[in-house]
Image (tube, grey):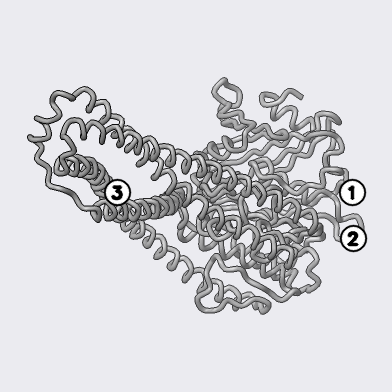
């Protein structure tokens, strides 16, 4: 299933100008004159606009690019045998069935919410990338993460780095590995659900184990006090005449026993929360110290130029945890006060019970001891019941985590197969194209960061992305194959051999029944005479991509979509 770009339209309603550009299936090269003036003709703007229209945020120089106001972008594309029109204006996205454009059923969706757009594109492209957000929960990523292997931004060519679109910091820097494997057909929302379920199960297991330990210690303490043999029938006979008085006291005792049990349980949980929060605060302080030492952001790996600003920002963040800690300490103090008060009430009511006992039993030691034993036995019985309930839940969680771990091992095995294919094929590619600035060691994983000789950064980056795509086609064949859009991949590469080899490498890796759209200044087609190419030459003046003629074309083509 291939996505083929048929045309891109960039329209300025304010100036009544536009750029309408068509593409062919196969290899397309957008070029301009190699002499002075060949740059700034709009090649990058055309290429950036494609995935930008599909929901990514391209790195336009907005101060210059949108000087005429907000542009309307319209992408005509095909997926399998279906033709679509996607319109974007700022944050508004509208998708049409091209074949039904003139009917009421033509509009598929109209959305100005990026999360909703991602959900709709999953249906269209059969690919969703799920990543863990800053809050620790997995969620469907924005559309840009779908196209990240298929696009090179000429000003952001960095080996094993993703900086080709704006707003990629919606997820922590740790998303890198999960993103790679999701594209390669291993990571999925199901695997992420398993990971999250395992994390929560382990947390719950720890809580239950701590609770079981506390309950066991309480049971031992009660048992150590011993118990007396109690003649229940004798007790019933003796308290019959004072039944109502004693029932009231007994109910009060039970009420305060339950309150004490509840307060003790809350205290255990609050004390555990304090321990966990102390660990978080310690980790945060460690991160701050590391950042102040390395001057590097732990989330996006960018250099921090203003240490003082960062420090006060992070300290304010840590102070927030401190405020939470104070709140928990306040709650703990309240619970301790509750326990103190309940113990006081319990002791007072016990005195009332003793007075009744004295009155009923005439200070009979046997019955008094039996009455105390009865209360202790009731508490002990409650504790034993709770221990049993905790153990049942623990046993269930242990079985559940075993099953989850076994399922996750299947994904680990798939990753191993993917890694083996990736490293073996990558080495073959490096040998075939004589790329010497990059080496792949045995055991290299698809998610590993790589380094290269600075003179071969561009060709190494192209080779890396193409190898990831080849691995994706092998292991994730059901997801849509996006066009390979590499904007001036030889930018700033001073090695003439590399400049030619980059394009030979790209052209040799045309996806099956797919599409390549690339660009450069002064393309020499004679160097690739044996390859079927669609060469698009831009002859417009610098910074003057849009024109009146293309506006008239767009006005006629899309009169049912926008009123121009």
For label 3, the residue is 390
Q: Is residue 25 visible?
A: no
Which of pointers 3 and 1 lies earlier in the amino acid sequence? 3
Q: Nearer the viewer, mark 3 or mark 1?
A: 3
For label 2, the residue is 35
For label 1, the residue is 542
Q: Secondary structure at mark 2?
A: loop
Image location of residue 89, percent across then percent down: 72, 33
Classify residue 262 by image quadrant. top left
Which of pointers 1 and 2 lies earlier in the amino acid sequence? 2
Classify residue 36 by image quadrant. bottom right
Which of pointers 2 and 3 lies earlier in the amino acid sequence? 2
Q: Relative to 362, is 208 on the left or the right?
A: right
Q: Relative to 510, is 352 on the left or the right?
A: left
Name the quadrant of the C terminus. top right
Q: State the CA–CA distance, disc 2 to disc 3.
A: 78 Å
């Amino acid at each position: 299933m291939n996505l083929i770009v048929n045309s891109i339209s960039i329209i300025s309603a304010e100036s009544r100008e536009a750029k309408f550009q068509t593409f062919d299936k196969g290899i397309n090269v957008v070029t301009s004159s190699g002499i002075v003036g060949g740059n700034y003709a709009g090649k990058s703007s055309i290429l950036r606009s494609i995935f930008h229209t599909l929901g990514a945020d391209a790195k336009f120089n907005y101060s210059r690019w949108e000087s005429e106001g907000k542009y309307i972008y319209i992408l005509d594309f095909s997926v399998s045998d279906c033709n679509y029109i996607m319109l974007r204006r700022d944050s508004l996205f509208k998708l049409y069935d091209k074949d039904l454009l003139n009917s009421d059923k033509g509009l598929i969706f109209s959305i100005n919410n990026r999360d909703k757009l991602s959900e709709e594109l999953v249906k269209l492209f059969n690919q969703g990338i799920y990543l863990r957000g800053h809050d620790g929960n997995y969620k469907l990523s924005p559309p840009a993460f779908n196209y990240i292997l298929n696009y090179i931004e000429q000003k952001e060519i960095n080996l094993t780095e993703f900086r080709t679109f704006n707003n990629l910091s919606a997820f922590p820097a740790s998303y890198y590995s999960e993103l790679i494997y999701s594209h390669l057909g291993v990571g999925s929302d199901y695997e992420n659900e398993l990971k999250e379920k395992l994390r929560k199960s382990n947390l719950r297991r720890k809580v239950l184990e701590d609770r079981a330990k506390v309950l066991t210690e309480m049971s031992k303490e009660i048992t150590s006090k011993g118990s007396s043999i109690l003649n229940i029938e004798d007790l019933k006979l003796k308290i019959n005449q004072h039944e109502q008085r004693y029932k009231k006291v007994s109910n009060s005792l039970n009420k305060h026993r339950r309150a004490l049990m509840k307060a003790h349980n809350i205290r255990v949980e609050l004390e555990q929360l304090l321990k966990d929060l102390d660990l978080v605060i310690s980790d945060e302080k460690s991160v701050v110290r590391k950042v102040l030492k390395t001057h590097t952001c732990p989330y996006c790996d960018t250099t921090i130029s203003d240490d003082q600003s960062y420090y006060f920002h992070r300290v304010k963040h840590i102070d927030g945890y401190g405020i939470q800690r104070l709140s928990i300490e306040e709650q703990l103090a309240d619970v301790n006060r509750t326990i103190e008060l309940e113990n006081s009430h319990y002791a007072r009511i016990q005195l009332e019970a003793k007075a009744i006992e004295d009155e009923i039993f005439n200070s009979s030691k046997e019955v008094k001891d039996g009455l105390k034993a009865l209360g202790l036995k009731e508490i002990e019985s409650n504790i034993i019941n709770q221990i049993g309930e905790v153990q049942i839940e623990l046993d269930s969680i242990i079985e559940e985590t075993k099953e989850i771990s076994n399922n996750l091992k299947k994904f680990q095995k798939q990753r191993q197969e993917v890694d083996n294919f990736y490293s073996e094929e990558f080495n073959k590619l490096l040998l075939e194209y004589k790329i010497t600035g990059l080496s792949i060691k045995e055991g290299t994983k698809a998610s590993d960061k790589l380094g290269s000789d600075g003179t071969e950064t561009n060709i190494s980056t192209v080779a890396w992305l193409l190898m990831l795509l080849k691995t994706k086609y092998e292991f994730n064949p059901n997801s849509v194959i996006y066009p390979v859009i590499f904007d001036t991949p030889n930018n700033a590469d001073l090695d003439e051999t590399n400049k030619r080899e980059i394009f030979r490498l790209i052209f040799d890796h045309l996806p099956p029944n797919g599409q390549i759209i690339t660009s450069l200044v002064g393309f020499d087609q004679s160097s690739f005479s044996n390859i079927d190419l669609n060469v698009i030459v831009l002859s417009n003046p610098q910074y003057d991509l849009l024109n009146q003629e293309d506006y008239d074309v767009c006005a006629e083509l899309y009169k049912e979509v926008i009123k121009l």
